[in-house]
Every structure is written in C-alpha cells, then in structure tokens.
Amino acid sequence: RSPSRGLGDVYKRQVQTSEVSITDTDNIIAKDADNTVSIGFATKSQLVFATQPSSTVVAGVNLATQPSVQVRDPYGNLVTNASDSITLTDWITADCSTSAGSGSLNASSNPLSASSGIATFAGVNHETAANLYLRASNGSFSTCSNLVTVSSASPSTATSTITGTGSVVADGSSTSTVTITLLDAFNNPIIGT
C-alpha cells in the first residue's frame, strides 16, 4: 500500500468526528509505529431537534420535555464552535410551511444563542389549543419538530359566559334558552364538558 492510499481509505470511510488510530504495519509512515489522526466536523449545514418537545401539553403549561436544537454538519456531526441565534416559531403543518400565526408561543429566551452548537430551550409553552409543530431556524437552515398537541386548560370563570333569552315566568310551561360557553384562561373552548 502507498501511504496516500492507506490514509485516503481511512479518511473516506470516516464521516463521524472521532479519533482514528492508524497502525503502520509496513513502516512507511514513521519510525514510531502508531499515529493518531483527529477528524473534526465539516461546515455547518443543518439544524436538528436533538430533543423533541413533549407530544402533549395543556395550554399555558411549560412542555414537560423542553426542545433542544443542535447545529450539525452534512454528516450529522455536532458543530461545537457554532453559536448561532436559533428562533422557535409555531406552525400547523408537518413541513412547517403554514404558520400557526397565533403568536402565543412563549419561551424563557427566544431567540436563543447556541452554546457549543447546542440551544436548549426553557419555559416553552403555547397558549392556544391546537395541533402544531415547532420550527427552529437560524436564518440559513430550519427544521421542524414532531407533532405537539396543545389541549385546553381548566375552565375559567373570568372568560366563560352564561347567557339566556330573557325573563321567564315560573308557570311550568314557559321556556328559555340558556347558553353556557366554557373557556379556559386563554379563551380556548372547553370541549366535551
């Protein structure tokens, strides 16, 4: 084997960051038999949800599992020197092509700067009951989370209403229509109660 072919074979097969130990059985690299070659990450090219958000949550309550987004190279390696500003937004389609537009996505910090290529969000919650997806974007790349189902919170006396058609004579035959609208604190309708 020629040295260039042997090293080229190792490099071509290695797409993950790591250390590779090369043993020179033919004594063509150097007098000391072993050398270590470090293979680093390539140029950043994608964002990935390393931790998906919780799949279900109640409106206004923080997700039990907060999302974590990583900046990676084309081979899936974490780009540890990335400090990209990453923004979460809410979308109603799996490919994040249709914005939810509700403006009720909250987080402790949004956008959030990645540290060593990782942005771990905190305090993420949504106030509108809906099926939605979170989109993480750094301005150049974006990615969509798995589905998050946000259900209504408990009924609120401050937002719920009771309306009737007016006075009724208590004669045993008069009727009136009474409408009760149960809403949570975020004006989401309470279904099935």
Image: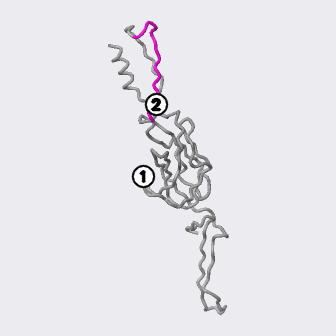
Residue interval drawn in magenta: 29-43
Tell me if residue 55 is in the magenta stretch. Answer: no
Q: Main secondary structure of the magenta part?
A: loop
Residue under the point 47% across and 27% down: 40
Residue 163's mark?
none
Q: Earlier in the sequence, mark 2 or mark 1?
A: 2
Dot 1: within a 10 Å radius of its alpha carbon, few (fewer than 14), some, or many (20 or more) residues? few
Q: Position of residue 62 (x, y in %)?
A: 61, 52
Residue indicated by mark 2: 41
Q: Quadrant of residue 129?
A: bottom right
Residue under the point 44% across and 53% down: 96
Left or right? Give the position of 169 relative to 50.
Answer: right
Q: CA distance from mark 2 to mark 1?
A: 27 Å
Three-letter code for the amino acid on which mark 1 is drawn: Asp
- What secondary structure is marked by label 2? loop
Looking at the image, residue 38 lies above or below residue 92: above
Looking at the image, residue 136 lies above or below residue 167: above
Residue indicated by mark 1: 95
Q: Quadrant of residue 114?
A: top right
Q: Position of residue 88 (x, y in %)?
A: 53, 50
Three-letter code for the amino acid on which mark 2 is drawn: Phe
Locate the C terminus and report the quarter of the image it occupies.
Answer: bottom right
Looking at the image, residue 70 lies above or below residue 25: below
